[in-house]
Each structure stands twice: as C-alpha cells, then as structure tokens.
Image (cartoon, rainbow, N blue to C red):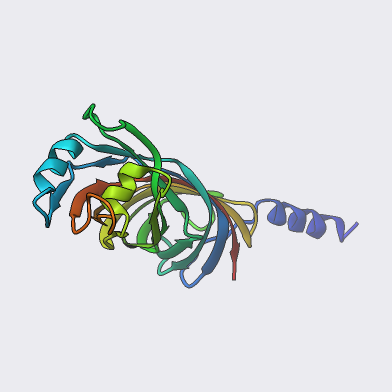
Amino acid sequence: MNMILPLALLTSLLAVSPVFAQQAGDTIINLGVAYIVPNASASTPVSTGTPAAATFNGLLAGTDASIANETTASLSVLQMLTNNLAAELSVGVPPTLKISLNLPNGTIPQSHPDAAQAKALTPALVGKYLFNTPQDPFRPYLGLGVTYASFRDVSINTSDPTLVTVAGTSAKLRSSWAPVYNLGVIYNIDKKWSINASVSYIPLESEITLLGGASTPGAGLTTKSTLTINPTDYVVRIGYKF
C-alpha cells in the first residue's frame, strides 16, 4: 500500500513531462523533400557582336521565359544558439531547371519548350526565431537569410534550329546572391524526433549569355537577357536531435 502513492505520483509526472526540444546548444539534422515553384520571366534579349545583331534584336523582341516546377531531396543542419534563436544551413540535391522560351515575333517559331536546362545549386544560411518554448510540441518560426545560387551543366535544346542559331556555341548563367524569406513550424514528436515544414521565397535573378552557333547566321553573335527565377520552395523534413 505504501508504494501505491509514490508510483501514482511518478506516473503523473511522466505523463505531463515536457518535450524539451530545440534548446540552446542542440543540433538537429533534417532530411526531406523540397518542391520548387519558380515564378520565372525574362527580359528582352539584346544581341551584339555582328552586323546581324539588329536583325536578331527584332526577332527576339518580347521574348519571355518559364521554368518547370521541380522536386528534390533536401538536407539541413539546425543549430540552436539560444532557446529561441537558431541558424540553419541547408542544401539540396541540385535540381535541373528546365527553361522554356516564348518568342511572340511571328517570323520565327513562337514556342520553344525545354529550350535550355541547368543544374542549380542553392545552399542557404538562414537565421530563425522560434516561438514558444522548448517544452512546447509546436514551434512556429520566422527566418531571414541568404543563398548563393550557382548553375552548372547549362545546355540548350540542340534539336531546335532557332536555339542553335542563337546559342549553338555556348550558354551560361551567372551565379548570384539572393535573400531568403522563410516561415514554418516544427512539430516535436518526442525528445529526439521532429517534423519541420516550411515555405521560403527567394527573389533570384541571373544573367543568361548565349553565343551564336559557329556555322549558323548567329556566328559571332552574343545575346544576353536577365532571367528572373523567383522560386517559392515548399519543404518538409524529418529531424533528429543530437
């Protein structure tokens, strides 16, 4: 009989014990998926370098771009600096951006699906403020950070004669810095495991440079345009606290 009351008290204490997640000094490794939704557009391309540049500028006037949505794996490390302030470094498997072009000038084909593609590497460092306390299962947060976007394996659709004329020699995208605006919520399953869901907006631009095909009317032609990507990233990750 003397043991019943202490056992009952212990059971009650365990039942209401706090989660104690995301405390100062904690390191959380998160792995999951990111769904990337670009809001793309392009400035009117400008061609230079040969007497034919003026003709190409007329043909390319009003060109616009779109980029297909992509899904990729995402990894992050969240370091708690205090009980409410954190820094997160994230990186994903570089998705392949598939860029389509639309040329409204009627003298050449208008639609150029999958005109070019490139792998995008966008590691990001984001400072976060976590609301609530380490004892709470739900922790909404706001974040602000920066990313450095670089592009690899840039190529054009060589089956499209218009693209070969304008960019048959080479195509490249300039690397650039961009801010990251982030909000999300962490749900703590237990003291070690959590689910982190977030959305980020990145106002990102790059300059695309095309060199005309060596054996085409675009030989010696350099064409440049500002490509606006502006992706919104939806990310869900499973986290483990060390």
Q: Residue at x 18, y 55 (%)?
A: 221
* 56 lies above or below 85: above
Q: Which part of the image, by quadrant, shows the C terminus?
A: bottom right
Please tell me which residue lies in front, 229 or 113: 113
Q: Does residue 203 appear in this view?
A: no
Q: Residue at x 69, y 56 (%)?
A: 13
Please tell me which residue lies in front, 70 or 49: 49
Spot occupied by residue 23 in the image (x, y as percentages of width and height): 49, 65
Spot occupied by residue 170 in the image (x, y as percentages of width and height): 31, 60
Q: Residue at x 46, y 47 (%)?
A: 198
Q: Is residue 45 left or right of residue 91?
A: left
Q: Is residue 215 left or right of residue 131?
A: left
Q: Does residue 210 appear in this view?
A: yes
Spot occupied by residue 12 in the image (x, y as percentages of width and height): 72, 52
Please tell me which residue lies in front, 64 or 4: 64
Quadrant of the image occupied by residue 30: bottom right
Q: Which part of the image, by quadrant, shows the N terminus?
A: bottom right
Quadrant of the image occupied by residue 190: bottom right
The residue furthest top is: 106
How many marks do you count on the picture? Answer: 0
Spot occupied by residue 99 in the image (x, y as percentages of width and height): 37, 44
Q: Is residue 66 left or right of residue 45?
A: right
The residue furthest front is: 215
Q: Is residue 18 left or right of residue 44?
A: right
Q: Residue at x 51, y 70 (%)?
A: 26
